[in-house]
Image (cartoon, rainbow, N blue to C red):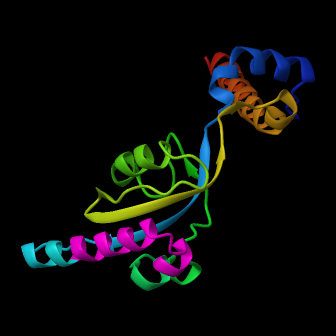
């Protein structure tokens, strides 16, 4: 049997699950990251380096230029530009590492540069390039996902029904 989901079923599910279908706020950022290291000497050198980078930015030096010169992040050659959106509720850096990082990112306005901060054994300076607030997905945007999910549920329900029918017949 082919499992189908009607538009009415999908709309009903959408209305019940709207809160779960919020797109989180997100930001495109550029970063300068300097690893802190583990010894007191490494920490001291890292702090001096991040303070020097911050001083240059406060003197209105170009963020991309400073990132290329100071950052130890993989984005350094691209002027610190991260190619992915940072999501307010989570993202690609890992939950533990991102908690403090996200807090600093989402306190910024587009074009604004943070003071340096420490997160996940690194010093960071972040520039907010672009911001998109959280928003409700429309039914049309969510529809393919909703239909796929509902088909899986219907398929599982039908499999249980068939198993029960077979069990009843075998007794």
| Rendered position, 152 above or below 55 | above
> Residue visible at 58% across and 79% down?
78
Place of residue 36 in the rendered image (x, y in percent of width and height, measured from the top left):
23, 71
Q: Nearer the viewer, residue 61 or 167?
A: 61
> Residue visible at 50% across and 69% down?
60
Q: Is residue 16 magenta?
A: no
Work out which quarter of the rendered image holds the N terminus and state it. top right
Work out which quarter of the rendered image holds the C terminus and state it. top right
Place of residue 148 in the rendered image (x, y in percent of width and height, measured from the top left):
77, 37
Q: Is residue 62 magenta?
A: yes
> Residue visible at 53% across and 81% down?
65
Q: Nearer the viewer, residue 64 or 23?
A: 64
| Rendered position, 26 above or below 127 | above
Kindly give the residue lying farthest to the front in the view shown.
59
Place of residue 18 in the rendered image (x, y in percent of width and height, measured from the top left):
70, 21
Instruction: Say left or right for 78 vs 99.
Output: right
Instruction: Say left or right for 150 vs 85.
Output: right
Write down the quadrant of residue 29 in the picture.
bottom right
| Rendered position, 126 above or below 89 | below
Identify the main secondary structure in magenta: helix
Kindly give the residue lying farthest to the right in the view shown.
7
Write down the quadrant of residue 33 in the picture.
bottom left
Q: Nearer the viewer, residue 126 or 58?
A: 58
| Rendered position, 25 above or below 153 | below
Place of residue 84 in the rendered image (x, y in percent of width and height, measured from the top left):
61, 61
The number of numbered badges drawn on the structure is: 0
Q: Which residues are magenta?
A: 46-66
Instruction: Say left or right for 20 vs 46.
Output: right
């Amino acid at each position: 049997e082919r499992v189908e989901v009607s538009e009415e079923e999908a709309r009903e599910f959408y209305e019940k699950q709207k809160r779960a279908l919020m797109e989180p706020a997100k930001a495109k950022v550029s970063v300068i990251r300097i690893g802190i290291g583990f010894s007191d000497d490494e920490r001291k050198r890292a702090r001096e380096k991040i303070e020097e980078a911050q001083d240059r930015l406060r003197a209105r030096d170009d963020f991309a230029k400073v990132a290329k010169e100071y950052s130890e992040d993989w984005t350094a050659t691209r002027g610190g530009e991260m190619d992915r959106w940072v999501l307010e509720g989570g993202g690609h850096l890992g939950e533990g590492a991102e908690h403090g990082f996200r807090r600093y990112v989402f306190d910024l306005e587009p074009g604004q540069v943070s003071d340096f901060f420490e997160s996940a054994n690194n010093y960071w300076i972040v520039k907010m390039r672009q911001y998109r607030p959280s928003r409700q997905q429309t039914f049309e945007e969510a529809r393919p996902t909703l239909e796929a999910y509902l088909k899986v549920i219907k398929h599982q329900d039908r499999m249980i029904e068939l198993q029960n029918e077979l069990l009843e017949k075998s007794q």
